[in-house]
Amino acid sequence: MEKDKIYQLRTEATKIKPLINIGKNGITESVLEEIKKQLKANRLLKIKMLKTSAEGEDIKQSAEKLAADTKSTLIDVRGSTVVIYK
C-alpha cells in the first residue's frame, strides 16, 4: 500500500472511536470473528488494547499478528490503540 493512502487512512482514523476493546483475555477466536465482521462493515477499524492483553509481547507485535490473522493491513499503532484496514 502506498504512503499517501496510509497517511490518508491515519488521518481518517483520528476521527473514529475504537469499536473493539481487547481485554485481559487477549486475542481470542471470538475477538477475531468480531474484528472480521467489523472490518467487513467498516473497512477501517480502530481497536483499543489493554496493556496486559499483549501476553508478554508488545502491542506492536500483537497488532501485526492481529492484522495477519484477519488478512488486513496494519495502518497505525499509537500507545495501546491499533488501526487496521481491509
Image (cartoon, rainbow, N blue to C red):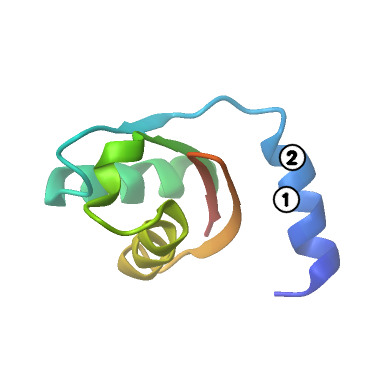
Q: In the picture provided, is 29 more to the left or to the right than 18?
A: left
Whole-number angstrom distance, CA of label 1 to CA of label 2: 5 Å
User: What amino acid type should be assigned to the residue bearing mark 1?
Assistant: Leu
Going by the numbered disc 2, the residue's amino acid type is: Glu
Q: Residue at x 22, y 43 (%)?
A: 31
- Asked which secondary structure carries label 1, the reply is helix
Front residue of 16 and 78: 78
On the rendered structure, is 65 left or right of 56?
right
In the image, residue 75 above or below residue 31: below
Identify the image quadrant of residue 20. Answer: top left
Image coordinates for residue 12, horizontal then vertical, percent: 74, 39
Q: Secondary structure at mark 2?
A: helix
Above or below, comparing residue 76 to residue 1 in the picture: above
Return the residue at label 1.
9
Mark 2, residue position? 12
Marks 1 & 2, CB-CB < 8 Å contact: yes
Relative depth, front residue between 57 and 23: 57
At x 31%, y 59%, the residue is 57
Quadrant in the picture for residue 25: top left
Hey, which quadrant is residue 13 in on the image?
Answer: top right
Determine whether 37 is above or below 1 in the image.
above
Between 64 and 5, the one lying in front of the other is 64
| Quarter of the rendering occupied by the N terminus | bottom right
